[in-house]
Amino acid sequence: MDTLLVFGHNPGLSELTNYLCNSYIELKTAHAAKIILPEGFDFDTLSGGTADLETIITE
């Protein structure tokens, strides 16, 4: 399994998660979103709705 961690500030991270996952969340301070990209994903095809929101980590 490959893993990519992205760190940043809001509202940018919430907006990125919402764009990639077609979701409507607002990440709070110290929260993280775990998103899953499709098998065989290539970053050249990155666009809205290409990922699935698995969970929001709050602790």
Image (cartoon, grey):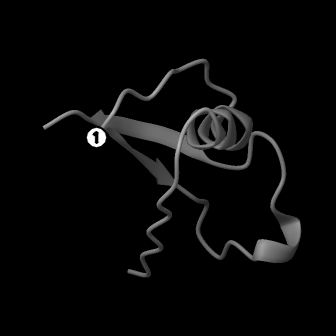
The image quadrant that residue 10 belongs to is: top right
Q: Nearer the viewer, residue 12 or 36?
A: 12
Judge from the rendering whether residue 21 lies leftward or rightward of residue 27; answer left or right: right
Label 1 is placed on what type of residue? Ala
Name the quadrant of the N terminus: bottom left
On the image, the x and y values in percent for residue 14 come to: 57, 34
Which residue is painted at 65% across and 76% down in the image? 40
Q: In the rendered view, tell whether residue 37 sits above or below residue 1.
A: above
Label count reads 1
Q: Quadrant of residue 15?
A: top right
Q: What is the secondary structure assignment of the residue under circle 1? A: loop
- Which residue is at a point 50% across and 21% down the rendered structure image? 26
- Seen as rendered, the residue at the extreme left is 59
Point out residue 20 in the picture as x, y percentages from the top left corner. 69, 44
Quarter of the rendering containing residue 55: top left
Residue pictured at 62% horizontal, 24% vertical? 23
Instruction: Single out the residue that lies furthest toward the bottom.
Output: 2
**Residue that label 1 marks:** 30
Task: Please rate how many residues cluster around mark 1, counting C-alpha atoms within 10 Å: few if below 14, some from 14 to 19, many from 20.
Answer: few
User: Is residue 45 rendered to the left or right of residue 9?
Assistant: right
Name the residue nearer the viewer: 4 or 11.
11
Vertical relation: 46 (above or below) 2:
above
Image quarter of the C terminus: top left
Give the x, y percent position of residue 50: 73, 49
Q: Residue at x 52, y 21 (%)?
A: 25
Residue 41 image point, x, y percent: 68, 72
